[in-house]
Image (cartoon, rainbow, N blue to C red):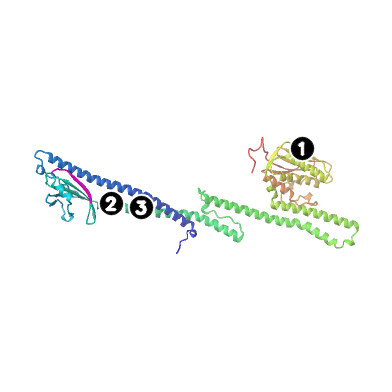
Amino acid sequence: MVLNPRGWRLGTRFAVIFALVATVIIALVGTLAYTTAAALIRADVRNGFESTVADLSDKLVEIHGQEGGGPSAGPIPFLSSDNLQVQLLGPDGRRTVSVEDPAEVVFFTPSDADMELAATARPGVVDMREQSIEGQAYRMATVSVGDGAGALQLLQRLSPTELMLDRLATQILWVGLLVALCAAAVGWLVGHRTTGRLVRLTDAAEYVSSTGRLDPVGPGDAHEEGNHDEVDRLGSAFNAMLARLARSKEEQRRLVQDAAHELRTPLTSLYTNVQVLGRVDRLSPEARESLIDDLRGETRELTALVNELVGLATGDHEDEAMRAVPLREVVDRVAERTRRRTGRDIVVDADDSVVWGRPGSLERAVANPVENSAKFDPDGTAPIEIRVRAGAVEVLDRGPGIDPEELGRVFERFYRATVARGLPGSGLGLSMVKEIAQAHGGRVFARNREGGGAAIGFQLPEYGPGGPEAPPG
């Protein structure tokens, strides 16, 4: 069976990664610690043995130097230790060992160098070496007594030291294994805690994909108090995305429903007039002319409605680049175009306000209330005024005004005031003005003028001196 890490759950991957990292760290630290400890312990044991041999050599020299010195001048210093075997090697090869348990005596054959030291007249001469006896490692030192009286031999077992180092290595290994297991457990817990929230997000995404429903993800662990990690932020962003998608879907549904409702009237009228065209030969010239005028009017209204719906649905104005826009230039263009189309007198009173925005969108936001003023007061003689003050654009007319109860709804999509329901239009224009103003960080307003008429406009933050330091997003 071939393991495929790509198919592992995230919790398993965390556990394996944590365990591997812990294993590598413990291996490096353990190896360094063992190597250092082993070197220190071996050096300490060796130094202790060498110090004992040196003391023995100095004692033998001291005894030999006394008056009447020689082997009979004083007792030979036999040493006793659990790790040391001390024996007297005679010049004839005989050995004397002082031990409590004869079974622990280590037997070995003296070397030629040992026999030479046993026969030498000079005391305190040392020969030191390591030797293997019956498969065990020993450290051996031979020290001459002097005057050919023999030599003292010290034999140190190295196995206790190595056994202690083996136990140390075993302990490091078990501690490393325990740490690796703990690291794996911590990794699994971290991974499980993280993946638990990710699984909910994945399930939610699959649920949205399969059902089309945009229900938000439950808070669960992602919103515990004090928990604001990346997964929590992802869950919050995912919920915000679902909320925006839900709003967009609801707005799309409402737009389609409202558009179907608004399109039904001009389409029905067009269908009726087309039916009448089938009997155009029976109509009088006046009736035919009236029919053609109706068709033209319905076609224009339908075209304007479709254009407004397309602009509203696609948000084409958002493709235009943002820049500093002098409002005077915008209202001058709108005033000139409206004068040409309607023949009405348009008066512009503008200061030097500059805003950060999209010129085409702002021009449309100004043009809509200006065209409404001309449409709602076709026979009026009073000029239509466009006033610009400190980023505020206000269109004033002397038309029928707005019912006070409807002032708060004139910017709603497809809403048409009572006085406008007998006139052409879709009810989308002012809603677009509102969306454009809000997209530029502003707001809209509407009120009735004293003496009759209405004042409709929007307020935008100024850009430049007296305005924000940076362009609004």
Q: Tell me where residue 98 appears, x and y as whole percent.
A: 14, 50
Name the residue beneath numbered marker 1.
349
Looking at the rendering, the stretch of residues picked out in magenta corresponds to 121-130
Residue 164 tag number = 2
Q: Earlier in the sequence, mark 1 or mark 3?
A: 3
Label 1: which secondary element? strand
Quarter of the figure that contains the N terminus: bottom left
Q: Of the residues under marks 2 and 1, which one precedes in the sequence?
A: 2
Query: In the image, is 143 to the left or to the right of 247?
Result: left
Q: Hey, what amino acid is under mark 3? A: Val
Identify the residue shown where x is 72% and y is 48%.
Answer: 432
Q: Which residue in the rendered view is the most extreme toward the top?
A: 465
Q: In terms of depth relative to the viewer, which is nearer, 362 or 239?
A: 362
Q: Specify the quadrant of the image occupied by residue 56.
A: top left
Location of residue 324 by image quarter = top right
The answer for how far apart the CA atoms under marks 3 and 2 are is: 16 Å
Mark 2, Cα crowd under 10 Å, few <14 / some 14-19 / many 20+, is few
The amino acid marked with disc number 2 is: Met
Instruction: Determine the CA span between mark 1 and mark 3.
Output: 86 Å
Residue 169 percent location from the top left of the image: 32, 52
* Mark closer to the observer (1, 3): 3
- Place of residue 87 in the rendered image (x, y in percent of width and height, measured from the top left): 15, 50
Front label number (3 vs 2): 2
Mark 1 neighbour class, 10 Å CA radius: few under 14, some 14 to 19, many 20 or more: some
Residue at left offset 10%, top offset 40%: 69
Q: Which residue is mark 3?
A: 175
**Looking at the figure, which quarter contains the C terminus?**
top right
- Is residue 244 shown in magenta? no
**Mark with earlier residue (3, 2):** 2
